[in-house]
Image (spheres, grey):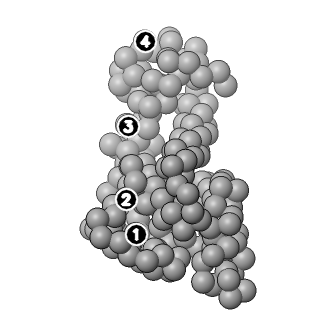
Amino acid sequence: MERNATTTAILDATHRLTVERAGTDRLTMSAVAAEAGVSRPTLYRWFPTRDHLLTAMAEYEEERFDRGLHTVLRPTQTPAERLDAALGYLVWFLDDNLGPHAVSLDPGFALRSLAASLPTQVETWVRLLGDALARVPAVRAGELSVDDAAELFLRLAYSHYLVRHDDPSTLLRSMRSMAGLRPAVGRRAAG
């Protein structure tokens, strides 16, 4: 699909409304057009149906995750710094995309979103962080593969949104510990 300022505005509006409404059940094409500042005919020219829009939004969110992860990894030097930056980004990204109450308001949407994104996110983590994940204690010990470690960190982060904890920094601290990263004063989630 061609991306331009209009389609980006529509996809960003769809994302905002989905988070605000905690799912897609109450998402209407009229609301998306109004939020994006475009007419309904313009919306329908780019996205003929709601299903087309939601499919494009899912692809866009995967691209956003990948771009954001690349961005936070760019200034890092060591595998440990890259893994630390990736863990912080993961927590921030999920917080931004799911919001604090997504599961309680629309559990079906939250679970479908997480399940659909897992394989792509695992692939991205392995591709970008393979050497860093190889230094995770359980991987070094031969108890997990790099793929297993990537999936474990993602599932652990997902669980924070399934059984919500009020402080994302607690999750981040736990994941850093599992990764064998040393705690540092003043660290915060990327975002």
Q: Residue at x 40, y 69 (%)?
A: 172
| Residues at circles 1 and 2 in contact by the CB criterion of under 8 Å | yes
Q: CA distance from mark 1 to mark 4?
A: 42 Å
User: Is 146 or 52 nearer to us in this picture?
Assistant: 146
Image depth: mark 1 or mark 3 in front: 1
Q: Earlier in the sequence, mark 4 or mark 3?
A: 3
Is residue 169 toward the left or the right of residue 8 in the image?
left
Q: Amino acid at mark 4?
A: Ser
Mark before the other along the chain sequence, 2 or 4: 4
Disc 4 designates what residue?
39
Q: Residue at x 38, y 37 (%)?
A: 16
Of the residues under marks 2 and 3, which one precedes in the sequence?
A: 3
How far apart in space, not on screen, are marks 2 and 4 (Cα)?
A: 37 Å
Q: Which residue is mark 2?
A: 189
**Residue identifier under label 3:** 16
Quarter residue 150 falls in: bottom right
State the SS at label 1: helix
Label 1 – label 3 distance at C-alpha: 25 Å
| Residue at image location 54% in from the left, 68% down from the top | 80
What label sits on residue 172 in the rendered view? 1
Query: Would residue 137 be visible to someone looking at this image?
Result: yes
